[in-house]
Image (cartoon, helix red, strand yellow):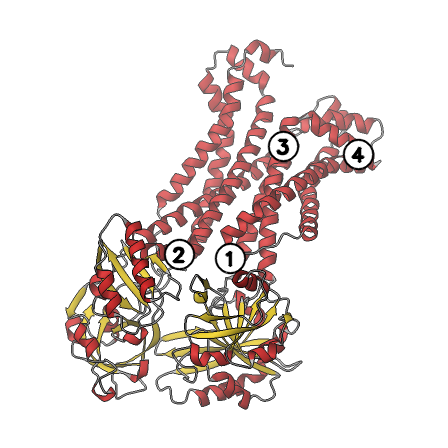
Amino acid sequence: MLRNYLKISWRNLLKHPTTTSINLLGLTLGLTTCLLVLLFIQNEWSYDQHHRLGRRIYRVNQIQTTGEEVDRSGTSPYPLAPAMRLDFPDWSKITRIHADRDVSVTISREKILLEDRVLFAEPELLDMFDVEMVTGNGRVALGQPNQVILSETTARKYFGTAPAVGKTFRLDNRVTVQVTGLMRDIPSQSNLNASMLVSFATMKDYFQLGIDQWGVRSGGSVFALLPEGKAPEQYTARLAAASQKYFADRKGEQNELLLQPLYDIHFNTDYEGSQFSPAIAPTYIYVFGAVGLFVLLIACVNFINMSTARAMTRAREVGVRKVVGATQGQLVRQFLSEAFWLAAFSALLALVLSYSLLPQVNDFLQKQIAFRWTEAVGLLVILALLTTVSAGVYPAFFLSRFKPVRVLKSIAEPGRGGQGWLRQGLVVFQFTISLVLAVGVLIVYRQMNYFRQKDLGFNREAIVTVGIPQTKNLTPIAEELRQIPGVDNITFALGAPTSGNNFGTDMRPDPANQEKKIGIALKIADADYLKTYGLRLLAGRFLAHSDTLAIASSVPEEQRRYVFVVNENAVKALGYSRSEQALGRKIGVGLNGINAEIVGVVKDFHTSSLRNPIQPMVMMNFPYFYRSIGVKLHTSNYTAAMVSIERVWRKFYPDDYFDAEFLDQSLQEQYEEEMRQFTLLRVFAGLALIICCLGLWGLATFVIGRRTKEIGVRKVLGASVPSLVSMLSKDFLKLVLIAILIATPIAWYAMDQWLRNFNYRIGIEWWVFVVVGAIAVAVAFLTVSFQSIKAALMNPVRSLRAE
């Protein structure tokens, strides 16, 4: 019997190639989209699930409150782990790490690489996290200085097929490490997916800020393995007491320690995730999944609409089958088998298409989503069955309920009444989803364009930033860079204005009062920073070369004279209404407890992405922390200038990695996530609209086909082609107009919530909805008008003979 159902279903599908092709294409696109989305979601939810002790592992986070500013961080001071080992002896294990990116790896002078996932760790890490060793003793390696464990992939990248164990290389040209072990590649779905593990004891020589300072937490974190059966809530009081003990000398601050579950790190955006894998909001995954599901639902709606629209064609078939003894259950199974054929064949095509597209998806999302055939087939089988049920159940029960006497006598025409309203409602549903996505595309585009055009308070054009590994005697390289044709100016600093290379610290309005503090960004820069980046001086003067000489290492510490330049927000934080009032004011900063006088005020400029507000900022000279050269060009031959800059740089740093990029390029990279969202929205909106138009075209074909005789009569009575086209199109255009009315408030709310992620954002203009609505109406009209014009131009004689 089943074989008979499938055979007849296959014949019916082949009998109507247009309908079958529309449904097949729509379902294939929907299933492909849904499968890729599910693979992405599965990849995200699998983060850190491979650790056997994962449910007992917690990260020790720090919440620092300074005045009204609250800083939530997954990083913590480096001395915290040794202190907690003494105060929490009942905890199974405690380990500290330091994660570093963009680390120069010098294998030889001819082979210098840039590594972006270097993890310094203590031996206890291997007792907590599942790291599979291939060769060597991991605990011994991480317990001794200047030892490193490489992943298999990294070992091949560095040394090819030669044995890696025993080889040495330099990290950032600061320390030499020896390979004493190899490990399996850590899964990409891990917050600590390091390419190498370096012994934490190496940090003493590698980390220039020092790891014994409670005020330093640059890339360092502490992880704890709680005893079996213990919950983090049981340690709240002890952690509060420990916070009071560890941070008692931090006047004017409130510090709190809390435990964050390992599985929460990837999905809690209140904290920063990890250095290697930023946290993402679960809402992003839910929305991503919902949109993928909606694309599949739109394809299912096409199937339902096409099936019910063909009801008149199938009605007599149902009548005949019932007369010869077919039961309603048999008819339901017959029609469901047709849906199954379509879903199964679409699933097969979707499997091949997904496998082909996954590498491009990985490159785009910067993920390593694996295509496991067993899982992919399993997911597709589930999706195909759900599609069969969702797309086939209603048409099956609708068609199988026809009364044979009424159908065979043509007393009633199936498809009118409730079924007609259903089809119209489904078309409205389809276009509502498509319109919401289209509005999202336009608003995200406008926000991205706003990012590109907004005045950031500094010059971003024709500036190259070059990293420097060490700051000793920078005068010679500065002189040679200035001699390059096309170089206008250079500056040394910790980083460019929006590089993120600032010290998050505090400002003390009264150096004598240690308890009153204001959170600030401390920017290290030299005297040429203002001119190179085009900052605007509002009052006083900027940093001068004489200020650098006044704090030289040759000057006794008690005689060094620092000066500060602040921004407008810092002036307001100090309680002044005019920039000039801040000049001469003496303040203190958290860096080395330096107290100095304010000599200048610059106009506010952005020091991070437009997601964040401009915060109070203090600028000062501190050559020890110069890590970047900013080169202002005034030439159109950027290629020649870059070659010359690299030549000079390599003369002074032959054993280091040359890392340079244009400032405007680095600014764009700050919004990579938003650009990915924009591209995904465009893809989803395009797919949804294509599937909608396919369904609308097929539905119009059937509906207009049933009115062939009416069209012939109207033409005989003198109806013009434009009037016929208008008559045949208006019913469909009404549905699109209704969808516009429904989609407008939904799209406005959704995009308003998205824009709230940015402190600097566009407004949602009314014309956005008008433009999107007009495009939707135009696309729908073009889709339907093809069939309308074809029918209107038909010879009325043929139309009247169609019966």
Rounded to the nearest whole Å, what is the CA distance between mark 2 and mark 1? 20 Å
Residue placed under numbered mark 2 in the picture: 669
> Considering only vertical position in the picture, is 250 above or below 391?
below
Which numbered disc, 3 or 1, marks the residue that appears first in the sequence?
1
The amino acid beneath tag 4 is: Tyr
Residue placed under numbered mark 4 in the picture: 5
| Number of numbered callouts drawn | 4
The amino acid beneath tag 3 is: Met
**Direction top: furthest residue:** 797
Residue placed under numbered mark 1 in the picture: 284
Which numbered disc, 2 or 4, marks the residue that appears first in the sequence?
4
Rounded to the nearest whole Å, what is the CA distance between mark 3 and mark 1? 33 Å
Q: Do the residues labelled 3 and 2 touch (CB within 8 Å)?
A: no
The amino acid beneath tag 1 is: Tyr
Residue placed under numbered mark 3 in the picture: 306
The amino acid beneath tag 2 is: Glu
Which numbered disc, 4 or 3, marks the residue that appears first in the sequence?
4
Q: Can residue 209 be seen in this view?
A: yes
Rounded to the nearest whole Å, what is the CA distance between mark 2 and mark 4? 56 Å
Q: Which is closer to the viewer, label 4 or label 3?
A: 4
Q: Can residue 416 be seen in this view?
A: no
CA neighbours of label 3 inside 10 A, class few (<14), some (14 to 19), many (20+):
many
Q: Locate the C terminus and report the quarter of the image it occupies.
A: top right
